[in-house]
Each structure stands twice: as C-alpha cells, then as structure tokens.
Amino acid sequence: MYVGLKMITDVVSVEKNTLISEANELMEQHQLWMLPVVKSGKLIGYLQKEDVRSALPSPATLLSKHELPDVMEHITIKDFIRKDIITVSPETEIETAAEIMAKNNLPGLAVTNPSGNLIGYINRSVMLEVLVDEMGLHRGGKRFAIEFKDRPGVMAEVSKMIADMGINFVSAASFSHDDYYILVFRIETENLDPVIEELKKRDFEILGPEAFAHIWQ
C-alpha cells in the first residue's frame, strides 16, 4: 500500500501573508495541529498550533476592544513559519510513513510531489483505517494466531492447509512481542474448530489471549 492511495487530498493550507487570526480560525474549524504553508503550490513550511496561539493576544491584554481588531489585521503568519517540515512522497510505502510518524511523534505528514508541490496529507486516522482494512476486519470471517519462531515455511504450509480445506483467505500479517513471533490469519469461515484441530496436529502453537494473560494481569 502506498501513501498516495490513502492520502487526504483536500488539504487546508495557507500562504505567508495569511493573517494569524485567519490561521487560528482554520485550525479551530478543521481541528488541525498544523497548517501547511505554500507559495504558488509549493510547500515552504508549516504553522504549529502552539505558535499560532502564542501569537494571539491573551485575555489580559491592555488593548481596548476597539484597538484589538486593528492590530490583528496587521499580524500575518510569516514570522511564525517553521521550516523543519518532514514530508513523504506518494510512492512512499504506508508502513514507512507510519514509522516516520512514530519516531518523530507526529500526528501526520505532508505529501509532496518531485516538484515540491503539496498534493496531500496523511494522518493517524488514515493509518488506523489502513490497519483495519489490511487486517480484513470489514470482510468478516474468523482470525487465529500461531507462533512461527524457528519454523521456516510457515506461511506456505498454512496457506496450503487452508486451501486444501476449501477455505478462502481474507488476510495475513506478522507481529512480534518480546520473544514471540506471531502470524495472524483471517479466513472466510464461521467455525474455526476444524482449522485449529488441524493446526495442532501439525504441532503449531495456537496463540490466543490466554498466552499473554500474564502480561496484563
């Protein structure tokens, strides 16, 4: 899956001559943590919510209610633009974008083309949608997990076993936790019992919640 297939294309952005009050309204209206700043379509930086709020007058300001609007009409965002924006291309693999967001503690990433034009945005909500989609939850069926440490060819063996039982695959994914290496399958069936029984015959270790209960108890 690539970023360009899941990115939000209706991106709210501003230019450097945008009033700080307008930027604040946009961030409040769209519940944004940052605003991309563009010039002729090219991404040149971003505004962070905390910077916008710090630039607005506090309730304790000495300006009168008549003076305040006049002052705010002259304060633009140009002095508050941050340049250290991290971007990805639409060809970036979605898991790579997720790793960048996690490592940098970012709620989202701007997406740019080779010319530097802002073409989209990807955020945590999109990442969660991708996770649910890739795990096939909306397609129904049942899931099971097995441990595959030090056992090569597991995917091929289980895939053939499921196919020989006349059952279709929905999804497969691998995870790790401490010393556990876990392979999770979702298949098109409402009764997992025959599948679990066959897996046990083949000496696979089934990993249900009880295998990890000691962690959260």
Image (spheres, rainbow, N blue to C red):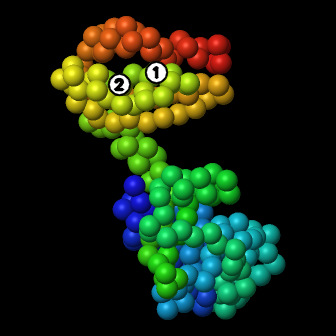
Looking at the image, is 192 positioned above or below residue 7?
Answer: above
Q: Position of residue 110 (x, y in %)?
A: 53, 69
Q: Earlier in the sequence, mark 1 or mark 2?
A: 1
The residue nearer to you, when weighing 161 against 34, is 161
Density class for disc 2 (Cα within 10 Å; few <14, some 14-19, many ≥20) is some
Q: Is residue 8 visible?
A: no
The residue nearer to you, when weighing 87 against 53, is 87
Q: Position of residue 119 (x, y in %)?
A: 44, 76
Q: Residue at x 65, y 25 (%)?
A: 179
Q: Position of residue 188 (x, y in %)?
A: 24, 27
Looking at the image, is 190 positioned above or below residue 182?
Answer: above
Kind of residue sitting beneath label 1: Ile
Q: Residue at x 64, y 72 (%)?
A: 85
Q: For the residue labelled by badge 2, is the local secondary structure a helix, a strand or a loop?
A: helix
**According to the image, label 1 marks what residue?**
146
In-image side of 66 versus 93 (left or right): right
Kind of residue sitting beneath label 2: Val
Q: Residue at x 39, y 70 (%)?
A: 9
Location of residue 149 by image quarter: top right
Q: Position of residue 37 (x, y in %)?
A: 57, 81
In-image side of 158 versus 91 (left or right): left
- Which numbered marker is on residue 158? 2
Q: Mark 1, mark 2: which one is toward the viewer? A: 2
In-image side of 61 versus 130 (left or right): right
Location of residue 33 by image quarter: bottom right
In-image side of 58 versus 185 (left or right): right
Q: Is residue 49 visible?
A: yes
Direction left: furthest residue: 166
